[in-house]
């Protein structure tokens, strides 16, 4: 590892997932003095999540069977020794200085908390995404988890979340989650996919051009068949039941409009419900720098980038899920392009462009065929929790809407405390903007997070600006 | 009955709308964005008398706090979280303590309640304060509200008295009759005939004044606030360091930070606020946050282990002489200003609203408004 | 090589190096370790990746640590978090 006293770089990459790893290795290869920063303990991000390196602990070999395309992972990781690495470092904000950017970090190595700064001429932001959630009755019971969280426990810690698990929501990601659980000894009582299978067919063109991805999917399907796991399409979890943890969940069928069909309730015993509705990109860092955004096919707010992964802000590149959710393969290609261009490469290999275009088409086809079915708002009752942190029930939002003209996300936050808690609206932001009938936007108050990772006032107060920092703006 | 259009649905526009509607005027509020989406949602809700030196602003503040208490009695305290918690100003040095004592004496003469607090009594009032602070003054009259709730409640009350509130309506111009009097206000998409218009556009009051043919000098002064993770009620009053008193009236262009630390009903502790003249610069300044954090930890050492959860910032509307502009504009008949309240607009809003409604109905103002008159600016009298 | 442990509300929880506190608790069947400030409801892991802040826990006297991120270490003292976790501060 490069000495940490070195704090000035040509290219600094935030995120060590597929996009960030690819960006960092291609930037170094192009000759740039490069750093990579990640909140996690090991390279890999969400897709190639790995346990913290340890002597007698959970080993990478042990979780290898849960992974795909580890060859690419190993190739990227092999490039890391030339890169300055900062793991267990959370970027809490990014600012500019005269020469480029200042990346403000909380160093959490060893369980402590220290504020430090790094400087870089250019940035590649590859912060990835997190599971998108919609509220339903009982979703705040322990044992209800995000699909990604269940997967992270398995890949990162070698822990199976539960004994009897139901997997639900929408999107191709539900399959690896169910397969991983089954292969690790959990009883998967069902995969409930809200989309209808025929919807896939209309997108066949894009799917066929991505046989690799399809192969991965077929592999999961075989695992599910081997374990006799029922996969139900057009089925949705409407409530979770239990006193202090989830004990049962009720599912219902959806009609072709995505509305629940009365009388189709079925209740099954589970100890874990893994649920996910696609992903929400983590945009606070690009937004802090003023990068332009757009709303993607899946309804997510994403960063606008050009053909070379440049954001609208000079010197800032964005790669991976943050410029459109599209999976690890796409993230890797985008990272490769971003890293090379950020390091000064004059052109992008046509092969990379072609593969990015095909992967994007595939991602968009997947989004179109896995929408969040409408009607979930109608299933909320006044006492259903919407904001988990501040325990704000749906009723509070509903009555605010009745009383008020001219509300938006920000006024909803001020009036009901929705999204004002510790997670800063990461979990409820998507749902609340749907409830308020608003398109996601960078200024709605649900994507902006001036403090991306909380840090103690003591750490902030005692941090000191590194030399050459310009005086505060006048 | 004369009509009035109020430009801006911040706390000041809301108070103007409420008092005017109560006088029986037919009121229309035009807001380009959302209700209380401007500076009103970007600050704290301190209603302070403690930070003001004797003079017209303090008189307005004393009147306004009486109005706030009336409003709370009328609406019930819940709609806007009015808390009469009192302010505790603490000195951080011996010279500071002497200055604070003198300042408080002057205020007492104008009717401000002050209670001197010695070093050993400070912890009876605020158990978590640093052990080494020399002295403080307690101001029982200081209070707080939740500004967005307050503005929304006032607008709702105005609506129930017949007022109309239109969002997404950006005012672009005024129409005037042959006698020079305002006859209508135009927005990007509509036209609102009216006899009078009130510029309650806060930090954008200069621009709105200009569009309506009556420019006034209003500038932005940026402020950051730190918000901690939720805590029990560990800070009882609004607690601030005495240097705040000097900063508020200061004319120094650079960055000023002084600390105000206060608890909220949501459990978070708010730490404000910096003052900078940087135009409408929206970028984060880590240096400002660092200073605010250091000052807060100086007052309350336990805060060192408490986490910062978010920050926000806003742009206070200020005039060169740091007084608000409240009153009729001599250049355009029917045109009134109610803006430029700098860091005290929440506190001063009800008294401002009432003054405006008295002016609109040719009633007797209950406080002397002459210090706030738009005609005090050369640009107004010569233009 | 004997397995390392940390304490959780007085009981000993075994873990494998590299696991988070939350993963180790999940592995022994503990589902929740926090009660919310409002309704006092139990919470545990939700997002598993440091995003949702549902899994807050007290580690060696420090509240509001994310159990899904904080790596388990031998001898750590971990306890359930009530409300804000700052109940020790004088009110
Ligand atoms: C929990 C979870 C599990 C997933 N598992 C799978 C899976 O098994 N299979 C699959 O096909 N897809 C999975 N995905 C989908 C996944 O989003 C992508 O396919 C892929 O990992 C995206 O790559 P990326 O590089 O864009 O982002 P990520 O892999 O998400 O990497 C982003 C990295 O940035 C870091 N980061 C973000 N913000 C900061 C900050 N402020 N400071 C420091 N570091 C920061 C994160 O710690 C993370 O390591 C999962 C998603 C989630 C949320
Ligand atoms: C960090 C900070 C801390 C503060 N703390 C306190 C405090 O503790 N106590 C206190 O009393 N004050 C405080 N303030 C000051 C207070 O917030 C302001 O004085 C007050 O909000 C001003 O209210 P307003 O209604 O005049 O302006 P705003 O709330 O800004 O309302 C003006 C409205 O006019 C609208 N508008 C603008 N142009 C047009 C147009 N052309 N057409 C239609 N509408 C238009 C805007 O969209 C806006 O909604 C603080 C301010 C800041 C920044
Ligand atoms: S489980 Fe979401 S932050 Fe830990």
Image (tube, coloured by chain):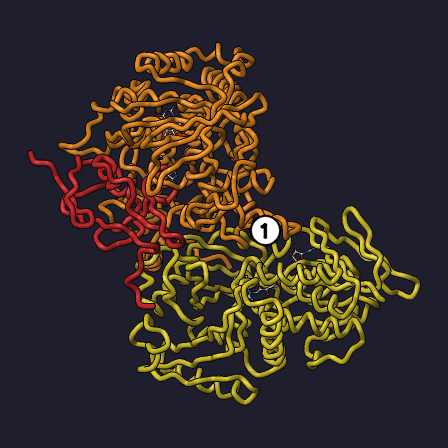
Q: Is residue B32 above or below residue A427?
A: below
User: Which image quarter: residue B15?
Assistant: bottom right
Q: What residue is shown at x 68% (from left), y 78% (from top)? A: B371
Looking at the picture, how far across and down is residue A426, in whole percent? 45, 42
Q: Chain of mark 1?
A: A
Give the quarter of the figure containing the N terminus of chain A.
top left
Towards the viewer: A91 or B357:
B357
Which lettered chain is shown in yellow? B
- Residue A333 seen in render: no
Which lettered chain is shown in red? C
Q: Is residue A215 above or below residue B175?
A: above
Q: Secondary structure at mark 1?
A: helix
Q: Is residue B139 above or below residue A426?
A: below
- Chain A in the picture: what colour? orange
> Ligand 1 falls in which quarter?
top left
User: Which image quarter: residue A210?
Assistant: top left
* Tag 1 residue: A400
């Amino acid at each position: 590892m490069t000495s940490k006293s070195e704090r000035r770089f040509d290219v600094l990459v935030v995120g060590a997932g597929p996009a960030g790893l690819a960006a960092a290795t291609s930037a170094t290869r192009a000759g740039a003095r490069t750093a990579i920063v990640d909140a996690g303990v090991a390279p890999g991000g969400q897709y190639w999540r790995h346990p913290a390196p340890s002597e007698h602990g959970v080993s990478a070999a042990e979780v290898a069977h849960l992974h795909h395309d580890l060859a690419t992972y190993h190739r990227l990781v092999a490039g890391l020794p030339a890169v300055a690495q900062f793991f267990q470092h959370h970027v809490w904000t990014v600012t500019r200085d005269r020469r480029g950017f200042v990346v403000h970090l909380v160093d959490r190595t060893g369980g402590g908390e220290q504020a430090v700064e790094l400087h870089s001429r250019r940035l590649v932001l590859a912060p990835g995404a997190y599971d998108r959630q919609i509220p339903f009755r009982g979703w705040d019971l322990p044992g209800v988890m995000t699909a990604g969280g269940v997967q992270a426990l398995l890949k990162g810690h070698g822990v199976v979340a539960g004994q009897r698990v139901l997997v639900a929501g929408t999107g191709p990601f539900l399959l690896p989650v169910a397969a991983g659980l089954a292969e690790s000894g959990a009883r998967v009582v069902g995969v409930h996919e809200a989309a209808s299978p025929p919807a896939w067919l209309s997108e066949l063109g894009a799917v066929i051009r991505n046989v690799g991805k399809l192969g991965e999917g077929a592999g999961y399907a075989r695992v599910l068949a081997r374990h006799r796991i029922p996969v139900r399409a057009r089925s949705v979890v409407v409530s979770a039941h239990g006193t202090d943890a989830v004990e049962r969940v009720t599912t219902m069928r959806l009609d072709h409009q995505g509305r629940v069909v009365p009388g189709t309730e079925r209740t099954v015993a589970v100890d874990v419900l893994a649920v996910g509705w696609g992903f929400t990109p983590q945009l606070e860092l690009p937004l802090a720098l003023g990068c332009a955004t757009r709303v993607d096919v899946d309804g997510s707010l994403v960063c606008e980038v050009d053909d070379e992964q440049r954001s609208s802000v000079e010197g800032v590149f964005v790669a991976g899920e943050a410029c459109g959710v599209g999976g690890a393969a796409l993230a890797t290609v985008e990272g490769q392009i971003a890293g090379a261009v950020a390091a000064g490469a004059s052109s992008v290999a046509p092969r990379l462009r072609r593969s990015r275009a095909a992967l994007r088409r595939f991602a968009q086809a997947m989004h179109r065929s896995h929408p969040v079915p409408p009607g979930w708002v109608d299933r909320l009752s006044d006492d259903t929790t919407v904001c988990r942190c501040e325990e704000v029930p749906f009723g509070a939002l509903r009555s605010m809407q009745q009383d008020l003209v001219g509300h938006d996300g920000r006024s909803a936050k001020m009036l009901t405390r929705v999204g004002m808690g510790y997670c800063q609206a990461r979990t409820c932001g998507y749902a609340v903007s749907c409830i308020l009938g608003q398109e996601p936007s960078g200024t709605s108050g649900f994507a902006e997070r001036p403090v991306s990772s909380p840090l103690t006032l003591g750490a902030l107060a005692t941090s000191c600006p590194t030399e050459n920092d310009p005086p505060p703006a006048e | 009955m004369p009509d009035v259009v109020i430009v801006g649905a911040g706390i000041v526009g809301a108070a103007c709308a409420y008092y005017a509607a109560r006088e029986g005027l037919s009121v229309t509020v035009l807001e380009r964005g959302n209700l209380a989406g401007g500076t009103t949602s970007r600050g704290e809700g301190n209603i302070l008398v403690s930070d003001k030196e004797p003079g017209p602003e303090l008189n307005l503040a004393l009147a306004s706090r009486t109005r706030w208490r009336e409003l709370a009695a009328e609406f019930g305290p819940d709609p806007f979280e009015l808390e009469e918690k009192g302010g505790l100003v603490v000195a951080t040095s011996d010279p500071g303590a002497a200055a604070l004592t003198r300042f408080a004496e002057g205020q007492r003469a104008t009717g401000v309640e002050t209670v001197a607090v010695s070093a050993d009594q400070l912890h009876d009032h605020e158990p978590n304060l640093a052990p080494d602070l020399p002295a403080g003054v307690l101001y029982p009259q200081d209070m707080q509200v939740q500004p967005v709730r307050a503005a929304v409640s006032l607008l709702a009350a105005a609506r129930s008295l017949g007022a109309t509130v239109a969002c997404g309506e950006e005012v672009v111009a005024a129409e005037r009759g042959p006698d020079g009097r305002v006859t209508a206000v135009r927005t990007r998409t509509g036209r609102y005939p009216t006899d009078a218009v009130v510029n309650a556009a806060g930090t954008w009051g200069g621009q709105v004044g200009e569009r309506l043919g009556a420019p006034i000098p209003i500038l932005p002064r940026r402020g950051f606030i730190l918000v901690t993770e939720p805590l029990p009620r560990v800070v009882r009053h609004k607690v601030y360091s005495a240097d705040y008193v000097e900063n508020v009236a200061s004319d120094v262009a650079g960055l000023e930070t002084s600390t105000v630390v206060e608890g909220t009903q949501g459990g978070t502790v708010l730490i404000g606020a910096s003052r900078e003249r940087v135009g409408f610069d929206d970028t984060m300044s880590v240096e400002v946050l660092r200073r605010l954090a250091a000052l807060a930890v100086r007052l309350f050492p336990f805060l060192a282990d408490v986490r910062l959860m978010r920050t926000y910032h806003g742009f206070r509307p200020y005039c060169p002489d740091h007084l608000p502009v409240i009153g009729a504009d001599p250049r355009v008949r029917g045109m009134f200003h109610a803006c430029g309240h700098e860091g005290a607009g929440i506190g001063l809003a009800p008294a401002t609203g009432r003054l405006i409604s008295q002016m609109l109905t040719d009633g007797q103002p209950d406080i002397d408004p002459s210090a706030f008159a738009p005609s005090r600016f050369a640009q107004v009298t010569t233009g | 090589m004997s397995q390392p442990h940390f304490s959780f509300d007085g009981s000993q929880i075994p873990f494998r190096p590299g696991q988070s506190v939350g993963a180790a608790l999940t592995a022994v069947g503990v589902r929740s370790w926090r009660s919310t400030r409002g309704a006092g409801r139990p919470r545990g892991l939700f997002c598993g990746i440091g995003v949702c802040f549902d899994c807050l826990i007290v580690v060696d006297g420090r509240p509001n640590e994310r159990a899904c991120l904080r790596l388990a270490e031998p001898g750590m003292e971990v306890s359930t978090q009530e409300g804000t976790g700052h109940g020790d501060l004088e009110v």
